[in-house]
Image (cartoon, helix red, strand yellow):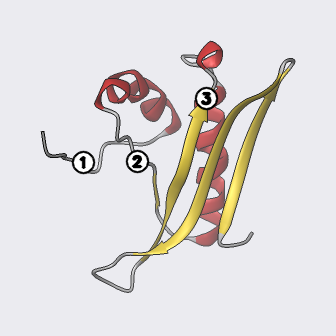
Amino acid sequence: IEDNDLFIAEGNEGLVGLLGIEDNTLRYSDYNVLVDSYFYVDPSHRGGTVGVRLMKAATLAAEYRKIPLYIRVSNPDRAKKRGRTDEIAGYFPAGYIVRLR
């Protein structure tokens, strides 16, 4: 496993989801974490198992490295919809992002 990983979900019609993760050092410490670089599920597959399977695959990579994985939810409209997927995959909220109006 390298510093960056890409997890791909395919269906009968081809690519249906992607989750990229990268190794990062937090700016305020020497603590290494994994963070997502992108997370996409085709709209026709949202609400199904694609997102959960991608998150579980990324979880295995984090467990292998023995460092935490953070998946950002920066779209507040999607946060409520993704909440159930996050819960099923074993994740919980760890903060939030603010923006200037």
Mark 2, residue position: 72
Which residue is painted at 58% across and 35% down in the image? 40
Residue 21 spot, x, y in % from top left = 59, 57
**Residue 56 in the figure: left or right of residue 82:** right
The N terminus: image quadrant = bottom right
Residue 42 screen position, x and y as percent: 64, 23
Up-down relation of residue 35 to residue 91 (above or below):
below
> Are the residues flagged by discs 2 and 3 in contact, CB closer than 8 Å?
no
The kind of residue tagged 1 is: Ile
Residue sitting at x 39%, y 21%: 81
Residue that numbered label 1 is attached to: 97
Residue positioned most to the top: 44
Closer to the N terminus: mark 3 or mark 1? 3
* SS state under label 1: loop
| Residue 73 picture location, percent across and down | 38, 41
Q: Quadrant of residue 23?
A: bottom right
Q: Amino acid at mark 2?
A: Arg
Going by the numbered disc 3, the residue's amino acid type is Val
Q: Residue furthest bottom?
A: 30
Q: Earlier in the sequence, mark 2 or mark 3?
A: 3
Q: Is residue 40 above or below residue 44?
A: below
Q: Give the residue number, with chain letter if any, for mark 3.
A: 41
**Image position of 97 with respect to 46: above or below:** below
Mark before the other along the chain sequence, 1 or 2: 2
Q: Residue at x 71, y 53 (%)?
A: 6
